[in-house]
């Protein structure tokens, strides 16, 4: 009797552990590390100050290129910490960054597969989960 009770308890613990592990995998990485990286990198290269993106008119091409090249160089690490809810958008943005770099940052570089919807998803996530503000001008 004791052995069958222990076996049932052990089975319940194993099932509960598997369910918890599955839920953790499904939800993916938390927002914190990705947000911290976005804030740190953009602040470091001068496109953000105090968790606020600077207006595009105030940004140098050099600072924008630095952010893009950093993201491409650290693509694997960035995707590892990217939360599942924005992972596809992040992948698409990085694909666009690679095209942009390959075209020597030509303004005619096509966005695809990066879309307006991807961009809106990334912006909304940064506002809500990271507390990042965007310049209005």
Image (cartoon, rainbow, N blue to C red):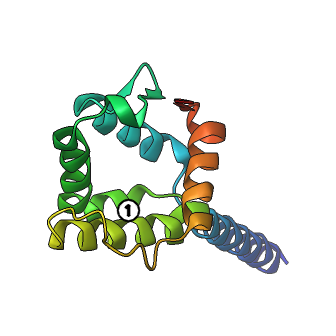
Q: Which of 108/65 is in front?
A: 108
Q: Nearer the viewer, residue 105 or 21?
A: 105
Q: Is residue 130 above or below residue 94?
A: above
Residue 4 screen position, x and y as percent: 80, 80
Q: Is residue 87 left or right of residue 91?
A: right
**Residue 84 appears anywhere in the view:** no
**Residue pictured at 47% horizontal, 72% vertical:** 114
Which corner quadrant holds the N terminus?
bottom right
Q: How many marks can you see?
A: 1
Q: Quadrant of residue 117?
A: bottom right
Q: Where does the image place residue 84, in percent across and percent down from the top left?
A: 57, 65
Q: Residue at x 20, y 51 (%)?
A: 70
95, 24: nearer the viewer = 95
Left or right of residue 2: residue 37: left
Judge whether 7 appears above or below 136 on screen. Answer: below
Answer whether residue 103 is visible to the viewer in this image.
Answer: yes
Residue occupying the far top of the picture: 50
Quarter holding residue 36: top left
Q: Which residue is mark 1?
A: 80
Percent x, y for residue 119?
A: 54, 59
């Amino acid at each position: 009797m004791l052995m069958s009770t222990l076996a049932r308890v052990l089975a319940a613990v194993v099932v509960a552990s598997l369910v918890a592990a599955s839920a953790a995998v499904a939800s993916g990485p938390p927002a914190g590390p990705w947000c911290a990286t976005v804030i740190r990198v953009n602040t470091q290269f001068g496109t953000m100050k105090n968790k606020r993106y600077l207006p595009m008119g105030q940004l140098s091409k050099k600072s924008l290129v630095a952010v893009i090249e950093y993201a491409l160089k650290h693509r694997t690490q960035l995707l590892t910490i990217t939360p599942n809810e924005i992972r596809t958008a992040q992948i698409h943005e990085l694909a666009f960054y690679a095209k942009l770099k390959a075209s020597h940052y030509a303004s005619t570089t096509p966005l695809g597969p990066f879309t307006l919807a991807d961009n809106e998803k990334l912006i909304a996530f940064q506002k809500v989960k990271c507390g990042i503000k965007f310049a209005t001008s």
